């Protein structure tokens, strides 16, 4: 069995190693789900317990990517136990087939504009929603990174922001476009209209109607509300803005390594995925770079 105290020590080690909050949250939920499943099954063999857990996930309709994440979480736990000198019977965790990597789906520039224009900046909440969408598209930051923005991270006079908490704990400075800067300034000024009953988080850039720091789940609702108002039928998430940012930058002639830095990708191969989303740009790069392309 896996004791809660052991899980807590492992989670603390993930934080020390600089794992992202999203990874820590997902991995800890997976391991705790496994621990409950194992305890309920009364199965003495740890390998059999893992197989029962994965089988239960399949029955619940979990996709292959979800199973692979759970397996990765368990491998992380048991690898840590080995290095930490913790006596824990190590199961044989099966290797799951790799899923086909789907290409990121970007919006068109017109769709991005329609979504942003669907927000009404007349109220402070509406001003927040517009600033959220403008910042997502202007910086290409992840949902968790946007929610983690502090007021001290913004330099609106220079048009840049310090994005914290990227994968691997890597911080980076990203530029903020003129329209996003204008939307952020308007949002900051709109705080004068916040009801006296609301005490906003003094550090957070984006807060809820109750004044608490915006979380990714609430951010998702803001995006979905904009999608509904704009009448778009396609699936759009906060991450779609990130894909659109990268694709439109590439189509506009941006260097792939520059996009890698702006997105905070550790591996250039991750950024290269966007070449498949912008074939015209890939062809232009080839024709302009290869000595015998002409």
Image (cartoon, rainbow, N blue to C red):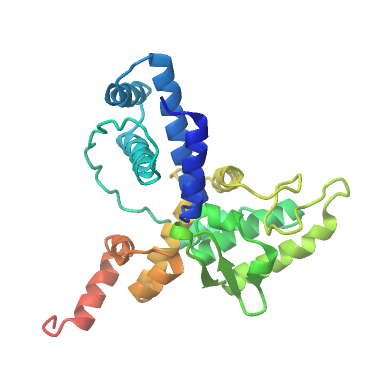
Above or below 80: residue 254: below
The outermost residue toward the left is 292
User: Quick one: quadrant of the N terminus?
Assistant: top left
Quadrant location of residue 181?
bottom right
Quadrant location of residue 251?
bottom left
Q: Residue at x 44, y 40 (%)?
A: 27
In front: 248, or 35? 35
- The picture places residue 103, in percent across and down from the top left corner, at 30, 52
The outermost residue toward the right is 196
Above or below 263: residue 75: above
- The picture places residue 60, in percent across and down from the top left corner, at 38, 22
In front: 45, or 282? 45
In front: 26, or 157? 26
Compared across the picture, whether 150 is left or right of 108 comes to right
- The picture places residue 136, in percent across and down from the top left corner, at 54, 60
The outermost residue toward the bottom is 291
User: Quick one: quadrant of the C terminus?
Assistant: bottom left
Q: Residue at x 50, y 41 (%)?
A: 9
Q: Residue at x 78, y 52 (%)?
A: 200
Compared across the picture, whether 251 is left or right of 284 comes to right
């Amino acid at each position: 069995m896996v004791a809660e105290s052991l899980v807590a020590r492992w989670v603390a080690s993930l934080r020390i190693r600089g794992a992202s909050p999203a990874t820590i949250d997902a991995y800890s939920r997976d391991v705790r789900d496994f621990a409950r499943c194992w305890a309920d099954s009364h199965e003495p063999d740890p390998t059999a317990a893992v197989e029962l857990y994965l089988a239960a996930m399949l029955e619940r309709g979990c996709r292959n990517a979800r199973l692979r994440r759970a397996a990765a979480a368990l491998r992380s736990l048991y690898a840590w136990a080995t290095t930490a000198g913790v006596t824990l019977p190590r199961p044989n965790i099966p290797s799951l087939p790799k899923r086909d990597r789907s290409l990121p789906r970007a919006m068109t520039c017109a769709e991005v504009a329609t979504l942003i224009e669907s927000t009404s900046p007349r109220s402070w909440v509406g001003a927040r929603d517009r600033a959220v969408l403008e910042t997502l598209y202007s910086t290409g930051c992840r949902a968790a990174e946007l929610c983690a923005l502090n007021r001290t991270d913004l330099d609106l006079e220079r048009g840049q922001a310090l994005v914290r908490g990227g994968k691997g704990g890597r911080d980076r400075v990203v530029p903020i476009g003129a329209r996003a800067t204008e939307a952020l300034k308007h949002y900051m000024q709109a705080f004068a209209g916040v009801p006296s009953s609301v005490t906003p988080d003094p550090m957070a850039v984006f807060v809820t109607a109750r004044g608490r720091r915006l979380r990714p789940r609430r951010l998702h609702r803001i995006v979905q509300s904009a999608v509904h108002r704009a009448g778009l039928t396609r699936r759009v998430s906060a991450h779609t803005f990130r894909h659109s940012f990268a694709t439109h930058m590439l189509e506009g002639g941006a260097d792939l390594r520059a996009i890698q830095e702006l997105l905070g990708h550790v591996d250039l191969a991750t950024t290269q995925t966007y070449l498949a989303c912008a074939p015209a740009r890939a062809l232009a790069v080839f024709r302009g770079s290869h000595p015998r392309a002409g």
